Amino acid sequence: MRLSLASFIVCTSLALGACSGGGGDGGGGGNDTGNNNQNPPGNNNPPPGNNNPPPGPPATFTIGGTASGVRGTGLLLKINGGNELAIPLNGTFVFGTTLTSGQPYNVTVATQPTSPAQTCTVTNGVGTIASSNVADVAVSCIDAAVSTYTISGTVTGLIGSGLVLQNNGGDGRTISGDGPFSFATALVNGAAYFVTVATQPTNPTQQCAVTSGSGTIAGANATNVSVVCAAPPPPPPPPAPASVSPARLFAVHDQGDSRTLRAIAAPGAPLAAGLFIRISGDAQVFGPIFQSGLSDHTFSLTTETQKTLPAGIHSGAITVELCKDDQCAVQYPGSPVSVPYEVRVMSPSPDLKPLSAVPNGKDWQTHGGSAAHTGYVPITIDPATFTRRWKWLPQDPKVKSLSDAVTYQGQAFVTTNVKFGIDPGGGFSAVGIDEATGQTAWVHPFERGPDLSVDRMDPPTVDNGKVYAAASGNFGASVFALNSANGDQIWRSGFTTQGGGFFLDAPTASGDSVISHGGQAGGLVALDATTGVVQWISDGPLGIADFTQSGSVAADGTVLYSVMPQSETSGRPVLRGFDRLTGAKLYSIDTSLPTSISLREPSPTPVITGANSVLIGYWYLIGGAKYRLEKFDTQNRTVSWFVDSDTFPDLPFSDLDPVVANGVVYMVNIALNRIEARNASDGTLLWTWTPPTVDQSPFRMGARMIVTDNLLFAATDRFVYAVSLTSHTDVWSHWNSGTLAMSASGVLYVKSDAAFLDAINLR
């Protein structure tokens, strides 16, 4: 049954007959059934026991509310699942059904409106009648057929506060920080939008600009509005208590290895007395971080990466606090200083590809590759094919260092514990390593004893199936000839060195002789390569022990070349030529140094660049350390040309031998931290190469370069690089640095200071 508000009528007992449908003089409405509690005819007395009137009906209450958003027709509501009420327009409504106190009510939508189709929802439609009418039921309708879309975007660079954005001149949106934002009001398809900055941020003042902020809705949310706030001018930086060099610590090493990291911190301004330093870093990445004071209130930081680091990239920062008390309760302005770091830990992956001889390739048999020490291998190789072959570690835990490697017929050879001053109590040996597998082929130990003074092992030389290794000490020296195939001793030759000798570099094999320096005074000793018998001993230029370290002897078949520390006549260093067969001194050529300037240790190794042409590179002191590259004309006994590096503040205790190939000499200018390519005929500069900035390390002292027909291999303290001779750029790098060697099979060897040997496939 449908009831409308207009037709709802309440009948009462006062409207007699209005609802009865008939006459009668009784007091009640409705049809007379003959039994309506009326007195029977003829009996006007009320029935016994019914003297009080009946109770009145209970109070009833209405349920209603407000409808909004109604645009369609046919909206019907219902209450308690029954009586329906038509809602044609927005406004108030009241159900015809009334309920008494305590009765529940539930208003729902029976029929949604159409034309247009709408979706109406009811709120506050469920409850229980208290003691008053219900008038807060709310019906809200929206068009079901119209989709709306939002306008949103991203704010970047916001530092200040108070930024307000608007869309179409309204719908203000306050932005408190960087990130996404969205306007509250959605738009229908085809509507235009225009986002602007209503209020610029302050504290600090910034200017924000909108891009991609206008357009027309095309059936999708607009999400690409960009608001970029320009950074305000930075405030003056606080005074920095220290500058750290390098500004970023960087290391790369294999899993299970570690690297030492060092930095120098210098005060940015004079600091008051009572400087206390506290350093902290990630203990999972670094071991203890040590500090030590240097001159002028500078100090050094030293630490090592943990060997337990997993493979991957580990980054963060080391914090340096400069304090006025030992608890760091009060710090200097600008403290703490943060030093970022990145440690890359590599997972070794051997590539044991088959090996074969490289056309024109040759083994690296001694210092500089050959008795001429040029460092040149006449091959062309593609750096895109380089892969790591293997990594070799010595089996003896007492081994703390390795010599440079030499190669011969599928093996690499090193001697162990070669560093001056290291006394591991043993571990001196020569080792053969299988090039194909990286496995130890043989070990020949050298044990100290009454007849053998061993304080260090010199780098080996290999020639004609023999490995020559020199063991030296304060009581003499011995040169050993070992079978290169199995390490068995062929002969040993011991001799007394002049003044007791510590050699520096490998002996030189030439013809039927093996030549080594004879001690501190710079003499030479020639041994028979077959028997080890001393062939001759050439006295040094002076009868005093004035020089303790000497480079290898160069040989061209008939003449031996060696650099002696002092000339008998001028007092200057000299290049001296000796007869290879007899040891007789042939001539001396003074260097170009002034007589008051002396050569600094170590003595360089001569490089034979051609007929009657020898190069040397050496350090000297004149207002600081300088490196001089000097070429000699051995036929005319003159200096052809020389060039100096820039002044270096400290004197390095290591050599930087040049290499030469195809008319070009390559030298390291350590003061400028670059390699210089120079014309071999006159020394003019052709081009230079500097390591990448990410390296931030100097060229490695004592790391001899290798040059091929298309690449130059060189090492800094952190990396080994291959530099193109045509583009003059680095085209390959390897994270383990060290001294270099190369084999006839195209394998590059890198000897690390951490006492291991890396092998790199070059094809």
Image: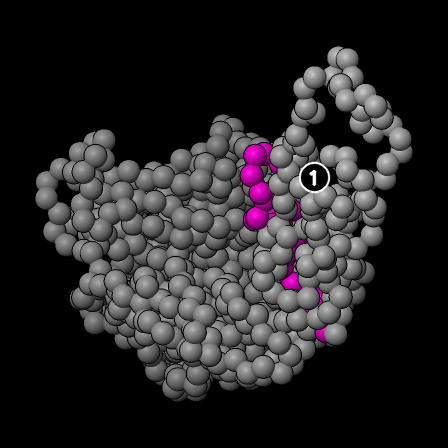
Q: Nearer the viewer, residue 368 or 580?
A: 368
Q: Secondary structure at mark 1?
A: loop
Q: Main secondary structure of the magenta part?
A: strand
Residue at left offset 45%, top offset 55%: 250
The x, y position of residue 688, in whole percent, is 43, 79
Going by the numbered disc 1, the residue's amino acid type is Ser
Q: Is residue 127 magenta?
A: yes
Few, some or many residues within 10 Å of mark 1 (<14, 14–19, 20+): few
Left or right: residue 107 versus residue 292 is: right
The x, y position of residue 705, in whole percent, is 51, 67
The x, y position of residue 653, in whole percent, is 35, 55
Q: Is residue 733 magenta?
A: no
Q: Against 114, is 310 above or below?
A: above
The residue furthest right is 33
Q: Which residues are magenta?
A: 116-145
Q: Which residue is mark 1?
A: 13
Quarter of the image that includes the C terminus: bottom right
Left or right: residue 463 versus residue 399 is: right
The residue furthest top is 49
Residue at left offset 77%, top offset 13%: 48
